[in-house]
Amino acid sequence: MPPLISLLLPVKNGLPHVKTTIEAIRRQTYPGYELIVQDGGSTDGTLDYLQSLHGMPNMEIASATDCGIGQAYNRALTRCSGDLVCFIAADEYLEDDSLERGVAWFNQHPHAVIVNGAVRLVNAADEVTQIFEAPAFDLLAHLRCEAVLPFAGLLNRRRIGQDLFYDESLQTCPDYEFWIRVGSVTDPGDFVSMKEVFKTARADRASMSFRAESYEHFCRDKLRALDRYLASRPPDADVEALRRSAAAGIHLWAAESVLFLEGPSPSFLKWCEAAARTEPSSPRLHRLARRSGAFEVDTATGRFSLTGSMQPAEPPPTATLVANGITLDGIQAHTYWHGATVDRGSIAQVRTPEGPWEYAAEIPLRPFGGFDSGCWYWVRLDLEVRAGQIGVGLLLGSDIAQEQIVSAAQGRQTLFVTVSANRGNGIVIRNGGLRQRSTVDLFGVSLHALPPTSRIQ
């Protein structure tokens, strides 16, 4: 007998996005589901809209004020009866065949704790910005926030059993504690990830995760969950070492997220400094220092210091061209970047591999005589993405700094990449976060410098 899927939808003041969520549920090709709506006391017309819906006999609505998302999901869980459970937010929507594919995935992996698909992220203009594929689950990586596991699939209710609930004392990030609890008693192989898109989520300020100010509360709740978990273990040196590395990891996760949202801002620096106090030797912290060029950390003492005046994102008019500092003559796709191609015609054209974030081309940085340590440098690129979406950034060994995402919808663009803070190896072009090949035309590239004597104080 086909399994019943319980779709749990907590919502509070979810208009207009919840309408898209509901319409996607209506289009599901798998009929064996129940929709459990838990309204948190909406005042914007959400409840009226939900109660006005017709032709959805498998939908059940309850409304009551709650103390947060954890309590909302828990209330929905007490009302559902499915063998498989799907968490979905009011600013997300399923693919038309998501439930059908999810059941097929579970037929292949009947003992899985969860079978996850990928998440398509869209911005306020409904443009696709990334396809986020669920990573393999590892408890230590989860504790350190090195691998974030989404709810983008179906949970096995019978397998998870009494652990299928959220900690209601955590107003944010209850999933962090949930996966600690479940991951501590199950095998990593029971977390199955598929590459197909399962749902679409908003990647703009409609989501708390895309507001830098949210990370204060996020970190506080994650640290509470971490402390509770470690308090349940016999105290020893290993537990204390894990406490330090995981706490630093939580702060670094916040720093990485804020860097993506708003660059090397005061908020970003605050989270980096917090990580430095806890684990000053963290390689992840020092990668952030190289990528941002905004701070330095003494690995022995944890002393955190800013690097001085911040280089502007674009060169001022007084900057000068560095002859032959970078040219398109040297652009190449390395042989180990499978599927990448470079056409060096009158306009250099790069085609990326299909996979998200796959590398496609490198333009070496080779200023005659090397870099002057006192100068600021910028690389200017004149380009147009013809198909898909690409990332352009500064290559720092195996890291990328200053990466900017450009899509075909943006037309011809002039980009500047700051170089001085890290003296990079070159400019790297890679596929954006979409699972499709992307194409970009490069019309020109140049290196510009500004000595200290030319800076405006």
Image (cartoon, rainbow, N blue to C red):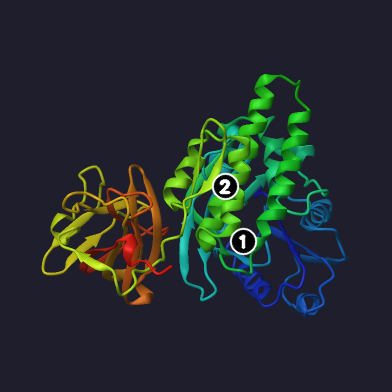
Label disc, if present, on residue 457 of the rendered structure: none
Name which residue lies at 27% across and 52% down.
372
Q: x and y percent of residue 313 in the render?
A: 40, 66
Q: x and y percent of residue 343 in the render?
A: 15, 61
Q: Which of marks 1 and 2 is nearer the N terminus?
A: 1
Name which residue lies at 83% across and 48% down.
169
Q: In this view, does 380 lie to the left or right of 140?
A: left
Quick one: label 1, few (<14), some, or many (20+) residues within 10 Å? many
Quick one: label 2, few (<14), some, or many (20+) residues within 10 Å? many
Name which residue lies at 23% across and 53% down.
365
Of the pair 272 and 128, the residue shown nearer to us: 272
Disc 1 on helix, strand or loop?
Answer: helix
Disc 2 on helix, strand or loop?
Answer: helix
Alpha-carbon span between mark 1 and mark 2: 14 Å
Of the pair 275 and 249, the residue shown nearer to us: 275
Q: Is residue 114 left or right of residue 404?
A: right
Q: Name the residue under label 2.
A: 272
Q: Is residue 359 above or below residue 88?
A: above
Query: The residue under label 1 is which amino acid type?
Result: Ala
Q: x and y percent of residue 305 in the render?
A: 53, 46
Q: Mark 1 points at which residue?
A: 212
